[in-house]
Image: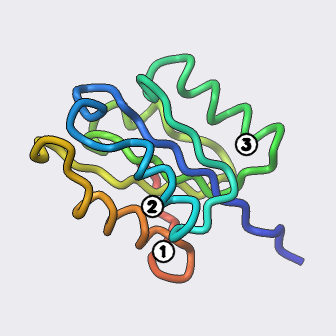
């Protein structure tokens, strides 16, 4: 029998995204609309501390589907290569100040029944 799906959503505020996006609202959307059981915001998700936060949730909380809301998927892709975990990335760049509509659509579509969570970063 397959393990129960446990989604962890991680919203990065680095690379100027925290200045342009309402990361708290995006985290709330990930939890409510994306059905993520674990939701975290981080100052720089691709640094060692950010990756350790995700790894801790995978190892300790049983997260087996990781959604990363951050800058370009080409940026630091190797940092988010977790074994035996499905990884999806919602990416955006240069949005208008305090924008939410486009990222909201990206995050809310990442629930497992709406979008495949199978691509590695």
The answer to whether marks 2 and 3 mark residues whose Cβ atoms lie closer than 8 Å is no
Q: Nearer the viewer, residue 110 or 24?
A: 24
Asked if the residues shown at circle 2 and circle 1 are in contact, with their CB atoms under 8 angstroms apart, the answer is: yes
Q: Quadrant of residue 103?
A: bottom left
Mark 1 element type? loop
SS state under label 2? loop
Answer with left or right where residue 10 lies relative to residue 98: right
Residue at the disc numbered 2? 119
Spatial separation of the CA atoms under disc 3 and disc 1? 19 Å
Q: Where residue 83 is drawn, which disc sits there?
A: none
Residue 32 shown left or right of residue 44 in the figure: right
Q: Residue furthest top?
A: 48
Residue at disc 3, secondary structure: helix
Residue drawn at point x = 73 percent, y = 32 percent:
56
**Residue situated furthest right in the rendering:** 1
* Residue 113 percent location from the top left of the image: 55, 82
Query: In the visual, does 76 lie left or right of 24?
Result: left
For the N terminus, the image quarter is bottom right
Nearest the viewer among 41 and 84 is 41
Query: Which residue appears at 72% of the width and 61% of the height?
Result: 6
Q: Position of residue 92 (x, y in %)?
A: 22, 49
Which of the two residues, 84 or 52, is positioned nearer the viewer here?
Answer: 52
Give the quadrant of residue 58.
Answer: top right
Mark 3 = which residue? 58
> For the image shown, how many numbered marks are present on the structure?
3
Q: Position of residue 93 (x, y in %)?
A: 16, 43
Q: Name the residue: 46% across, 19% down.
A: 47
Per the rendering, the mark at residue 116 is 1
């Amino acid at each position: 029998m397959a393990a129960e799906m446990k989604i962890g959503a991680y919203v990065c505020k680095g690379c100027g995204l925290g200045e342009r996006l309402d990361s708290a609202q995006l985290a709330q959307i990930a939890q409510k609309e994306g059905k993520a059981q674990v939701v975290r915001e981080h100052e720089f998700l691709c640094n060692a501390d950010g990756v350790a936060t995700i790894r801790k949730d995978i190892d300790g909380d049983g997260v087996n589907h990781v959604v990363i809301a951050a800058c370009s998927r080409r940026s630091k892709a190797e940092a988010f290569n977790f074994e035996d975990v499905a990884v999806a990335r919602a990416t955006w760049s240069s949005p208008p100040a305090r924008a939410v509509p486009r990222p909201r659509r990206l995050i809310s579509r990442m629930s497992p029944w709406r979008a495949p969570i199978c691509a590695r970063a």
